Image: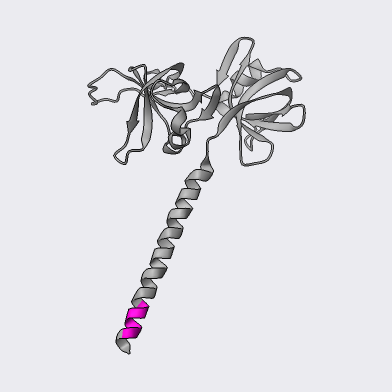
Amino acid sequence: MRSTISTLLITGTIFIFTLNCDAQRKFEKEKIENLGLQEVKPFIGKVLAWEDNENYFNNGFYLQTGTEKLLVQFPTHLGSQLTSAITLGNTITVNGVKTNEPKKIQFVSTQINGKVIYNTPPIVQDRTIEKEFLVGSGKISELQTNKNGNVRSYVVDEKTILHISRNVASNLGKLAVIGAKIGYSGIKRNQQEGEVATANFTIIDCQTITINGKEYLAN
């Protein structure tokens, strides 16, 4: 009798453990899938007013499109560039990504008077370590994978390596194949002291990826 009860308890424990493992795997899979791709889209509208943060630094502006009033948010270090380029009342096109908050847009770029303003990192005082923001395009010549076989970067024109997040690479799937034309923007990775390069590649931590005419966040 005791043997039967022990067997039932062990079987039940294994069953519950298996269910928990399956549920966890399903949760992780859904978590990754729900992230999806964050497509960068154009938003056209009239600039109504500036928005400040709690320290009274400009970090956004209101854009009245044909159907709604949107808050376009940007890092405070872009305040000088944007406030000097944008005139209240003018109609502009903002490339951005809708956030989880209603009617809020994450700023990616805009073009005003022929000049493109990108969401670049802040300029550091030490010019020797300033991060360079690059924009370009080319054809994918190689897919680089990690030890698990997941694509983590693209080699473009056999001279540039584009690093992207695993989730973005997974969602791009069959679009980003060898031979496909791809556009990119991001931060150039500088060679660190003590590092030895065996090949001369430009390495970029991508902010955006453009493929088949659509732009996506890459990080």
Q: In percent of the image, x 76 and y 19: which residue is there?
A: 89
Looking at the image, residue 203 lies above or below residue 105 = above
Extreme residue toward the bottom, this view: 1
| Number of marks in picture | 0
Q: In percent of the image, x 59 and y 12: which residue is there?
A: 115
> Where residue 66 sits: x, y (%)?
77, 27
Q: Is residue 212 left or right of residue 205?
A: right
Q: Is residue 70 left or right of residue 35?
A: right
> Where residue 134 sits: x, y (%)?
45, 18
Q: Is residue 46 left or right of residue 207?
A: right
> Where residue 169 sits: x, y (%)?
43, 34
Image quarter for residue 95? Answer: top right
> Where residue 91 sits: x, y (%)?
73, 18
149 and 121: which is toward the camera: 149
Q: Which residues are magenta?
A: 4-9
Image quarter for residue 113? Answer: top right
Looking at the image, residue 66 lies above or below residue 115 = below
Looking at the image, residue 2 lies above or below residue 171 = below
204 and 153: which is toward the camera: 153
Q: Main secondary structure of the magenta part?
A: helix
User: Visible in this render: residue 157?
Assistant: yes
User: Visible in this render: residue 75?
Assistant: no
Which quadrant is home to the N terminus? bottom left
Q: In percent of the image, x 25 and y 19: which residue is there?
A: 199
168 and 186: which is toward the camera: 168
Taking the magenta stretch, the answer to whether it contains residue 33 is no
Snapshot colouring = one colour
145 and 49: which is toward the camera: 145
